[in-house]
Image: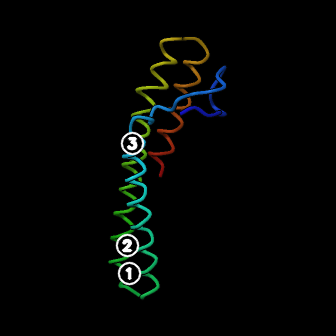
Amino acid sequence: MTDEHPHDTGHVTHQHGYAGDKDAILTRLRRVEGQVRGIARMVDQDTYCIDVLTQVSAATRALENVALLLLEDHLDHCVRDAAVKGGAEADAKIAEASAAIARLVRS
């Protein structure tokens, strides 16, 4: 699968690092989607606050796990490839990964 990616430097097309894990990632995201719908039903049904918060925490952890899988794939594929090429592309990919890690840590 190829598509345009605004963060690629010098590339029009790019196969994303998660391509090999795409089905697993989509399965996890669908599960999270179901969890969020369940949380909405809980709120609609006036479920006890702590029970709702427990489910929000579970959905948050599930999304964090997806984010970590995506980050791992990005480091293993995109950053590694850029590091082999070196130069400005490597610097950009490392900075991009560092920023992504910082966002994950802050969330």
Residue 38 in which image quadrant: bottom left
What separation in Å lies between label 1 and label 2 (alpha carbons)?
A: 6 Å
Q: Give the label, 3 or 1, closer to the camera.
A: 3
Is 50 displayed left or right of 1 in the figure?
A: left
Q: Are marks 1 and 2 in contact (CB under 8 Å)?
A: yes
Q: Which mark is residue 59?
A: none
Is 5 displayed left or right of 65 in the figure?
A: right
Q: Amino acid at mark 3?
A: Leu
Q: Which residue is mark 2?
A: 53
Disc 3 or 1, which lies upstream in sequence? 1
Q: Amino acid at mark 2?
A: Leu
**In x, y percent, where is residue 10?**
66, 19
Q: Residue at x 48, y 48 (%)?
A: 106
Q: Residue furthest bottom?
A: 46
What separation in Å lies between label 3 and label 2 (alpha carbons)?
A: 22 Å
Disc 3 or 2, which lies upstream in sequence? 2
Q: Which mark is residue 49?
A: 1
Q: In this orientation, which residue lies closer to the viewer: 63 or 20?
A: 20
Give above or below for 32 relative to 86. Answer: below
**In x, y percent, where is residue 9?**
65, 23
Q: Which mark is residue 68?
A: 3
Q: Residue at x 43, y 55 (%)?
A: 29
Q: In this orientation, which residue lies closer to the viewer: 80 or 20?
A: 20
Q: Secondary structure at mark 1?
A: helix
Label 2 neighbour load within 10 Å: few <14, some 14-19, many 20+: few
Label 1 neighbour load within 10 Å: few <14, some 14-19, many 20+: few
Q: Secondary structure at mark 3?
A: helix
Q: Residue at x 61, y 34 (%)?
A: 3
Q: Amino acid at mark 1?
A: Cys
